[in-house]
Every structure is written in structure tokens, then in C-alpha cells.
Amino acid sequence: MIFKTFVYGAAVIPFVFFAEYYVLKLFVKFNLSPAAAYSPLLIFTLAGIEEYFKYSAAKTAALKSKYFDEPVDALIYLVTAALGFAALENAIYVFDGFTQKEFLPTLLSGNFRFLGASLVHVVSSAALGTSIAFSFFHKKHTKINIFLGFCTAALLHGLYNYFILKNSGGIFTVFLAVWVFAAIIIYIFEKIKRMPKPAN
């Protein structure tokens, strides 16, 4: 089931590319964002698109299955989908760089993508997974939890993209912030594992 979720996470990449392409065209057409730059609204919209498709991958592959029966499963499946997504995204990026014969720059920037972009995919999806996990204890708030978790995931992802694209605050400061959030997610993960499984 984890392998299936990983594959589904990678499989949504083409849909994300198409969705983002048409959103970019709409933003330019209606003057919501310059063609040569990313407005804050566009940055957060694109982040939301990626978070939606990662969640959809996890939901389709695992969250509707009988194997989704513990709170911690939500985090595991969301993170797994994010890893599949990041793996194929990075592979495409590296392949494109190599086809342009930019070997050294691609390898160097590929390392930064692993440290930053891949981790932010995991952290943002884990934030949504955490919110879904807590819905196990408050079934009537499940939809609200998913919505709030999705907003948190899109916000974290969008903030990362914004500071990277705008070169604000320094790249290492941004990376540090992502790693701090990762540590928080790991702490929450351990807390959820120790919570008693809710009665059916």
C-alpha cells in the first residue's frame, strides 16, 4: 500500500504540470501576474495546486482503503505521496539539466532541491496528514480538519516558494525554517503514535 501511494504521488506530476500551465496562462491573460514574474497570489495558488494533487494521490491510493485504520496512517500515506511526487519532480529536473549539458550546475542545484524543495513537499503534506490524523478523535470535524490542514500545507509550501523566488531572507535561513518545521512534524508524529487508537 505504501508503494502504491508512492507511485500515485509520482503519477499526478503530469496533471500538476497541465494545471499549473493553464493557471499561469489565466494569470497572465487577466493581468493577475506579469509574464516574467510570479506574483504572491500566483505563488500561493501554484503551491495549493501541488498540495491538492498530492492529497488526491494519497486519498485515491490509500485513504479510502481498509488499511487506513489508525491516526498515524494519515501522516505515513501523505508523506509517502509527497516523496513520490518529489522523486519524479527531481528526476525530471535533473534529466532536463543533463539534456542541456549543464552537468555541474544541475548536480549542485539538485542537492539544494533535495535539502529544500523535497523536504518542503514532505513537511507540507505532513501538516495536512497531521490534521487528518487528529480527525480520528473528532469525526464530526473531519472536513474542517482537512480544510485547515490543506490551508496550512499550501501556506507553508507557498511561503517557501515565495522566499526562494524573491531571494528574501537568505536561502539558508529559508532552509533552516523548513528543517525546524520538519523537526516539529517528527515530534507530532511521535505524539500521535502514542495516542490510544480511537474506538470505532
Image (tube, rainbow, N blue to C red):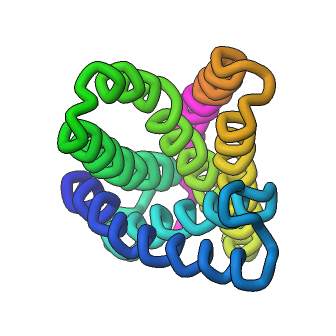
Tell me residue 14's x, y (percent): 33, 70
Image quarter for residue 174?
top right
Q: Residue at x 28, y 39 (%)?
A: 97
Q: Residue at x 71, y 83 (%)?
A: 29
Residue 135 seen anywhere in this rendered image of the structure: no
Residue 40 seen anywhere in this rendered image of the structure: yes
Provide the residue span drawn in magenta: 184-200
Image quarter for residue 90?
top left
Tell me residue 103's x, y (percent): 23, 26
User: Of residues 49 and 131, which is closer to you in this image?
Assistant: 49
Q: Residue at x 54, y 80 (%)?
A: 22
Tell me residue 76's x, y (percent): 41, 47
Q: Residue at x 74, y 38 (%)?
A: 166
User: Of residues 61 and 173, which is closer to you in this image?
Assistant: 173
The N terminus lies in which quarter of the figure? bottom left
User: Of residues 135 and 29, which is closer to you in this image?
Assistant: 29
Residue 165 falls inside the magenta stretch: no
- When the figure is inspected, residue 144 is found, relative to residue 121, above or below; the finding is below
Image quarter for residue 38?
bottom right
